[in-house]
Amino acid sequence: MGSVLDLTWMAWTWPTAAFFAAVVLSVVVMGVWESYSPGGNPRRGVFGIDTTRGDRLFISWLGTGFIHLAWLGFVGPPLWWPLGITIAWFLFVFRWV
Amino acid sequence: MNKLQNQKAWWLVVPVVILVAFNALIPLMTVVNYSVQETFGNNLFFWHGLGWFQEVLTSERFHASLLRQLAFTFTILLIEVPLGIAVALCMPRTGPWVSVCLVLMALPLLIPWNVVGAMWNIFALPDIGLLGNAVNSLGIDYNFTQQPVSAWVTTVVMDVWHWTSLVVLLTYAGLCSIPDAYYQAARIDGASSWAVFRFIQLPKLKRVLTIAILLRFMDSFMIYTEPFVLTGGGPGNTTTFLSIDLVKIALGQFDLGPAAAMSLIYFLVVLLVCWVFYTLMMRNEEN
């Protein structure tokens, strides 16, 4: 306690740490993927917008937030179903958007 | 496939990332941490799962302030955009009056938010304010501190006064960039002024109007200072918009968990609108 790196005020929990780790990991994985097989120029998908891989990652994460919030608001926990929908959403966005 | 650019320049962004980490990312992470816990102060936190999110999403209070927020945003858009276009169309394109008009239009934009709120508060007071007193002496019962309708009208008029200029200036810039050849062609065809507006000016203004509408949407969606100074969210809760409600929960009641959950929901909505804004702008630039 009292040291410079005392982070108790941030009130970390394991689930939130895991969430941020997943976000960072997704960015790192994208970086590795890009360096091995570059995604190239933006392409136009089913929504009629030009997206690069990074854009698609952002759209996927943003969608994830809304899918989970909608489930919580309209149905309630547990959140296994929205997790499944999210995985399908990620695949859809990366393949067709 | 070959890369089009050298991506090493991204390293130059590192200083900004560090700065943003300190003033945005770390606080945002803390908000995420707060949103799943309950605290009674003294840095003691208890796990609460996603309960706060569920509570906020299903609470009537949140629905009401979200509804008020949307009503406010769409009302000011419905007034400011047509009014802004109309004013811009009336402004002179050449001559000495151009700079006078531009400065006059820019003036409201230069005034700080809290000063706008304070000005309108005093201006609209029913007993001593110029506006309030004048309206009351016309026989209209008007008291923005006690009547919901008066409070709404005052808040909307204040926002229109403050921000229509932005729409005017953007539209004016768009109008000035239309080449004269279009107008000459319209004159040869004997087009009415409505036809000129409908088939030349409006299509050419599409870009700037997109920017204006989205800017006004985002700004008004996050409005805090002006209504807070003018009405304080009252009378009752009638002008308590999302950000005012958020501050009431976070600092008034010190309910950090629900406030954190609410601000994350709010953040996601703003993020979505920002993304739409960015995508549309990029698309316009390509076209």
Image: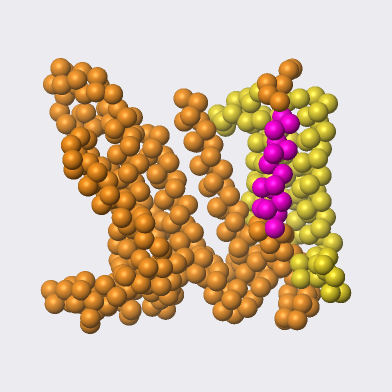
The x, y position of residue B121, in whole percent, is 32, 73
Q: Colour of chain A?
A: yellow
* Colour scheme: by chain
The x, y position of residue A28, in whole percent, is 81, 40
Question: Which image quadrant: the N terminus of chain B?
Answer: top right
Above or below, A71 relative to B199: below
Above or below, B246 relative to B197: below
User: Which residue is located at x 19 percent, y 77 percent?
Assistant: B133
Q: Colour of chain B?
A: orange
Which segment did they paint magenta?
A: B7-22
Residue B41 is drawn in which quadrant? bottom right
The x, y position of residue A46, in whole percent, is 60, 29
**Does the image show residue B225?**
yes
Instruction: Pick whichever, A7 or B194, lies toward us.
Output: A7
The x, y position of residue A41, in whole percent, is 66, 23
Q: Is residue B217 left or right of residue B257?
A: left
Q: Is residue B5 left or right of residue B133?
A: right
Main SS class of the magenta portion in the image: helix
Residue A82 forms part of the magenta stretch: no
User: Which residue is located at x 41 percent, y 72 percent?
Assistant: B229
Residue B49 is drawn in which quadrant? bottom right
Residue B195 is drawn in which quadrant? top left
**Does the image show residue B28?**
no
User: Which residue is located at x 53 percent, y 47 percent?
Assistant: B273
Above or below, A4 relative to B125: above
